Structure formats: C-alpha cells, structure tokens
Image (cartoon, rainbow, N blue to C red):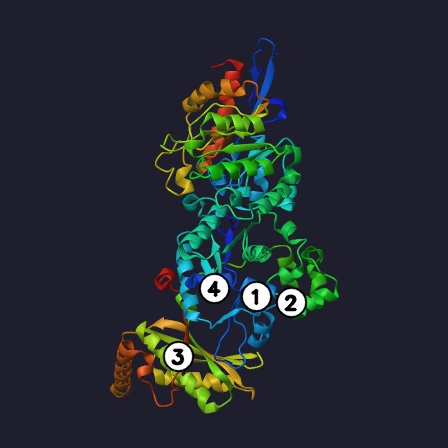
Amino acid sequence: MMGQGFRVRERAVLHFNVADFAVAVERVEDCRLRARPLLIAPLQAARAVVYDMSEEAYREGVRKGMPLRQATRICRGAVVLPPRIGLYHKAMLAFLKELQGYSPLIECGQADGHFFADVTGTHRLHGPPPDIGWRVRRQARNGLGINPIWTLGTSKLVAKVASRLVKPVGEYIVTAGDEEAFLAPLPVAVLPGLTSRELEQLRDFRLTTIGALAGLSRHQLMVPFGSRGDYLHDISRGIDDTAVCRPTSASETIDYQHIFADDSNDQEEVEGVVAALVSRTGCSLRGRQQVAHRVGIWLRYSDGGHVVRQSTCRNGTSGDVLLRKLALAALQRAWTRRTRIRSCRLVCDRLQRQSPQLLLFSEREGTELREKKVLAAMDALRHRFGHAVIGVGRQAVGVKGEGRGVSGEVGSTFGSFL
Amino acid sequence: MASASSGGCPGRVEVVRPATAGAPRRVCPVYVGTCGYSYTEWADSGFYPEGTKSAAMLGLYGSYFSVVELNYTWYQMARAEALSRMVENAPPQLLFAAKLTRTMTHERDDNWREQLALYRQGVAPLGKRLVAVLIQLPPDFDRSLANRNYLAALLDGLEELPVAVEFRHHSWAVDSVFAELSRRRVTMVTVDAPALPGLFPVLDVVTNPALFYGRFHGRNRDGWRSGNMQKKFDYDYSAEELHAWCVRYLPLMAVGVDQGILFFNNHVRAQAPRNGAKLATILAELAGGKR
C-alpha cells in the first residue's frame, strides 16, 4: 500500500525506434548504400533468410524472414550484405549513451533499435518530455547519423502504438488523458503482444478496431479469451502499468552465434561449432572476470522453426570445460528434430562477478588451477594473435562466432567504428 | 474602463484608445497568456493544484487566461483529430495561437509544401478560435535571398490564415521587411529577450492592423545560449520591468490595431502564468489610470 505523502505521478514514457536498424547502421558505415535498396542476410548460408531490409525493399514486398532468393527476385538490384550483429550492438550502446543523459530508466532491445525511456519527474532538469524527445533525436541525427522515430505517451503501450503509426520517420505525442480516444479508431493489429490466434479470433468477432474491443466488458472478453481477457480489456483502453526496466547485471548476457554455410544435421559438425562458441564465450567471461550461471542454446532449423533450451549450474563458471558440458546438455535437449540446422546461438546469462575466494580443498584447487593456467595461457595467445590461433581438439575450425556482444552495458561508442 | 477579466474573459484587458481627429474612440482588447499550458512543473510550483492531471490543465488554465499558445505543434505536425478533442474540452472563451511545425522552420524538409498542407488540415478544427499561426524562425535564419524567397513562399502557403512571424536574426530589422509584412497583413512579433548581440531587437513596429503579438522569453543572459530550456527560460519579470515595457511599447502598438496578444514563455517554476497575471493587472491599472 502506498504510504501517506506519496502520490503516483502521471508517467511520461518516450519510445525511440530506429526503423530498419541494421540497414540504418550499415548506411552510416557506407553512405553509398543510401542510394539503393538494401537487404541484410547471411550470404554463406544456402537457404538464407532476410534479417532486415530497407524501406525501399519493404515497399516492394520483401519481409523479414523471407528466403533471400525470393527477396532478391522481388527486389532486383538490391545490395545484399551479411548481418554484423556486433556492429549493431555497438550502435545500440552509442544511442543508449546519448539517452542516459536524460533518464536513468531506459529499456532497450537486442540490436533492434528500440528504446523506452521513462522521463517522469525529470522536467526540472531537462524540460518538458516532448523537448527531450526532440533533443535526443537531434543528437542521434547529428552525432550518430541515424534518425529515430520518437513518440511520447503515459505508458510503454501507448508510446509503442504511436510509433507504429509514424513508421518509418516522424514523431507522435499522445496527450495524457487522451489515450482511449487515440486508440479507439486504430485497427487491433497495432496493439502489441497479441498472438496471431487472438487476432484471428478478433476478426471472427468482427472486432476490427481497438474502440470496438474497448466496448466489451471483462466478463464478455473472458468467454472467448479466458485469462487473456483482462489483458485485452486493459490494453484496449490504453491501460498499461508495465515499468520501463533498466538493464541490470542480472539481465546481461554474452551471446555468440554461428550460421552454417550449408544447413547441417551432422552431429560432429554441430558439436564442434558449439565447442567453438563456448571457447569464445569463456574467453569473454574471463576477460570480464565474470562467471555465468546459465548457458542457453538457440537452434534455428532450415524450415524457420527454432528451439531454445538451457542448462544451469549453481556456482557459476567461466571455465571452458564446464561451459562446454552445460552447452552440450542444452544442445541435447534442444536438438529433437531431424530437420537440418541453419544457425546455432549460445547465450550465457545470470552473470556474476567472479569470486576472489580460494577453494578449500587443495586437490580440487590443483585441478582447477591447472585448467585456469592453461586457459590463461590460451587467452593470452588469443589476445595477441587472434582467437583462431589456438583451440581445443573438438572445436570446429573456422567458426568466427558472430558476436552479439554484451547487453546491458555501455562500452565503446558508435563513433569509434565510423 | 478596463479590467484584467473583462466580459467573462480572464486575462483579457480592454485598452481604450482615445478619439483622434477623424477617428472615433475605440477599445483594443489585449489578451495575456502563456506559451503552452501543460507543464507538470506548474503543479509542483503551485499554479495548478497539487497532483493535477494533464487532462485537467487546460480547463484550469482557462480560469486564468483567455488565450494560449500551442507549442506542441512545433514538435509534431498538428493533427486534426487530437486538436478537435482538445477544442471540445477547452473553456468556450479560450483562443489559440499555434506554432508552425519545426519541419518548416528549424528543420526544413524538402517536402515542406506537403507539410504545410498537412498543417493547414491539422489546425482546421481551431476554426475562428485560431488567432494566429506563429512562424518562429531559427537564430541562423538570416535575410539571405534564399531565406527571403522561402519565407515569401511560406506566407503564400498560409494565405487566409492569421499569421505572425518571429525573427531571431537581427538582419530582418529593416524597413523593406516591415513594408512587405504590412502589405501582406502579417504580424511581426515583438520579442522581449536578453539584450545579446545578434538577436532581433525589441521593436514597436506594427505591421498588421488586425493583431499585435508579443512574446516574453525572459531576460536570462547566462541561460539563453545554454541549450537547456530550463536555464534559457528561467526568469521572473519584476512588476517594474513589466510596467516599463507597457509604458514604452503598448501605447504605440495598440494604436490602430483591432486586438493584441501577449505571451510569456518563461515557463520554469510557473513564472510564466504568474508574470502573465501580473502583466494583466498592470495593464488594467494603466488603462484605468491607477498607476
């Protein structure tokens, strides 16, 4: 219960969205790309799918996840570039740094150009929220060369819907108190978080606008939608109390991905790739003096389906041996189909600072100490001559492991790679 | 003779112009207001009751003033549906001035003609309650040939709407500009700002017999070029400063003009509405001969 003397302020949430983020970053890197339609897709994969595309390509019918061959047929003359996830992460961090000058409460996606900033109560320092939106956009344009959409609402929901209306460029201010009237004439498809099944059900009921949905009571919605009825009831009225969540150390991840040149279901090859990704992840963890408590394996199959499975360890580790054991356990659980695998991603999360405390038992300490010395020597070599210079026997050769970087931390700036 | 709330219109002062040879005695209504009305800070500072929600602010504002300058139309394109809802809920006496969107002034796009068409549609719901469209030009917008041509095209595009132009660059303070604005019946905004080099001077030149338009930005010399709105517009006008301004400029501006509007932009800590109320009182006293 809220204590006396406290009152809930009307929230001011800004949403920034750099449309076609990967394309925008690539165009900052090479301004010649601005003149032509651009597709981002892994080039080495036999049946690659589109990772991102420019507005011109979108207008011609190209969509994310579309097979690259089909996309290049639709959009002839498009330039195709491989995704550089690490670069997009750097751009995200650079934008985040700009935004941190205005609010400590910022939530951002994974290399997708989406940011929420809760600027409630910052007006005495930075002025009215619309002015913050405009300033951040101006700074991003002048400093980073990207032009984000910015929208303002009293919740993440309203700000997000507003940005869908102005895509690919523009701004939208939804005045506090105007949420329901703003949403009412819009199609239900612009509401975030609805499944395709729910959209289908809404179509069956001829509930095409948000206003029509808002006309139904909780009880009425509960009949077809069950427990989701409450959610639908609230979002149709612009009610959303979801907090803007600042990334914490608990939400940091280390993330590497490999896209197979040809889709594969060869166990030796896939396990070799996992070993190579583990080696890179372990090296990153040790460099940051952190341990991971959870290792996740994301498999994407050639038919577009994907599976995620995880393994955890109580004490956390940065050693390659245990990391590999966890990763292979997760792989075993994830790999349940005979369909070929297109890409494999290894994500380490629940990161924690490495404890400086020594182990109690000398024999364990001796084994671990030897392992640590070997790893330290390997890391030193990799640091000097590159990661590929040394590896364990089962590790696949030539796996670069496209770094998806470390989220939740401000590292090098966007400007440093321009 | 005059009051700070004449005819059920708070913040409206009727300045009586004496009869002259060939011209009868006339009344020039002067409306005082602020640039924007929706500031959380104004509830924190006690102008609005504590905890006032944004949706309730315009109604409360209307109990103090009868004109408001909409500044959010500078940040985003005016949208007819949103403005319709605002007008429906606004106090009936409230008049509006609307800033032209930044994509036609500070961040001019190549498609500014389309933007202008959208803007005209967007402000249409304001109807006869729209007293002026404010074209606020950026400080680097000097009187070059290209800028003169652009401004002329912009004014052509806004024809039939009441228009006011605020210059920030001193090069526009020349007779030929005043003459052209007079020919077009476009109001030139009189600005009160810090006395800094390069800024447009404070002038009492009236270019439109239908309207004079004044904007008080505050006189914070240190904050003006800080890049931070909270510093730039942090200024509290004293009664003496406002009185001196009225004595110096108002008699010349109110002559032969149908009506005038005066806005305070020093929004920080609700200084703008307080200074607005102070000015309305001073105007009423001056008009009534009490000072």
Q: Which residue is mark 3?
A: A400
Name the N-terminal-most of marks 4 and 1: 4
Toward the front, the furthest residue is B145
State the residue at coordinates (44%, 54%).
A141
What is the CA distance from the residue labelled 4 to the residue labelled 2?
Answer: 48 Å
Name the N-terminal-most of marks 1 and 2: 1
Residues marked 4 and 1, same chain: yes
Local crowd at mark 3 within 10 Å, few (<14), some, or many (≥20)? some
Residues marked 3 and 4, same chain: yes
**Residue A88 left/right relative to A156:** left
Query: Splitting the image into 4 quarters, where does residue A347 fall?
Result: bottom left
Instruction: Answer above or below: position of B190 versus A242.
Output: above
Residue A70 in view:
yes
Residue A1 in view:
no
Q: Mark 1 falls on what kind of element?
A: helix
**Residue A380 left/right relative to B36:** left
State the residue at coordinates (44%, 21%).
B243
Q: Which residue is mark 1?
A: A57
Give the amino acid at mark 4. Answer: Leu
> Chain for mark 2?
A
Q: From the image, which quarter does the C terminus of chain A lie in? A: bottom left
Name the N-terminal-most of marks 4 and 2: 4
Q: Nearer the viewer, residue B221 or B77?
A: B77
Which numbered disc covers residue A33?
A: 4
Q: Which residue is mark 2?
A: A227
Q: Mark 1, mark 2: which one is toward the viewer?
A: 1
Name the N-terminal-most of marks 3 and 2: 2
